[in-house]
Amino acid sequence: MPEPVRRSDVTEVHWENAITWGILSILCLLVGAFFIRFGHDWGVVNLPFWRFGGLDLQWVAVPFLAASPLMFLYALYRAIASRKEGSYTVECPYCHEPNEFVAKPDSDFTCMHCDRRVAVKEGRILDVMAVSCGYCGAVNYLTDKTAVLICEQCGHEIPLLDPETGEMRHAPRGFARVDDRSLYELVLVDPGRDREGLILSLQHMLALTRNQVKDILEELPATLMTGINRRKAELLKAQLEEIGATAEMRKIAESSEPSRPT
């Protein structure tokens, strides 16, 4: 399911259009005024051997002067629409900071403050439970939707009890943990077809404005993050690939300890 729409994103789009069309309205007015003032006898030639009375270009001002108020009205409409967007605020169960959307979220979303994934089921924010990793003691969080839990600190799997079967749930066969302490950088190579979805995702991932994200997309490949561990690089890479973008994780520093697969 698509990620819930944040009110700040919708408001930013409205104001982006309002400013653009407002500037175009002013430019049309200036061009129209120019032709009204200087359009008479345009290009007069008065030479001994040739005379040309010039062209009357004042009529050129008509479409510009007619378009100017229409553009201004549209800009005004977008500005007013930004204030009339719906507002629904939910609290992040991890950091307890507010997240504002245009409607009640009905699918999982990423908190704009702590960047954690907030689980939503049937329009209800699921409660978060804390468990300690049996290997390193780090605190990890899970919800009723968590199928498999991997420790954020050491990468070990934390066994979970399936309430339906009474058996322990495990990561899919073939999963192997590797103690990789190297640092990586995440590089965006191709934005894919869903450009709007990518902009929204990068806004939340990098905590940037819409225009800042657009600047990044103008020059690809672009480094999105650097100095992150392998697990975070893999998670962010998968998040980008989910919306059709292509990203690469590149090692920038060798691990201080040898990797040991388990």
Image: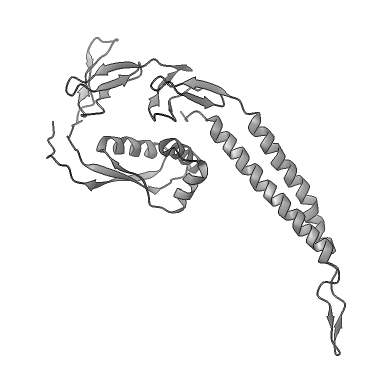
- In this rendering, the answer to whether 6 lies above or below 26 is above
Question: Is residue 29 found left or right of 200 in the rendered image?
Answer: right
- Going 49% across and 25% down the picture, which residue do you hit? 99
Observer able to see residue 147: no
User: Is residue 218 in view from this perspective?
Assistant: yes
Q: Is residue 101 left or right of residue 170?
A: right
**Image-quadrant location for residue 260:** top left
Question: Residue 125, relative to residue 8: is it above or below?
Answer: above
Residue that sits furthest to the bottom in the current view: 49
Q: Quadrant of residue 94?
A: top left
Q: Residue visible at 61% across and 25% down?
A: 86
Residue 223 point in image, percent of width and height: 36, 48
Q: In the image, is residue 80 above or below residue 105? A: below
Q: Nearer the viewer, residue 164 or 240?
A: 240
Q: Is residue 51 above or below residue 65?
A: below
Question: In x, y percent, where is residue 67?
Answer: 76, 50
Q: Position of residue 26 (x, y in %)?
A: 72, 51
Location of residue 14 by image quarter: top right
Coloring basis for residues: one colour
Seen at 23% across and 29% down, the residue is 153
Where residue 97 sits in the image (x, y, percent)? 45, 23
Q: Quadrant of the C terminus?
A: top left
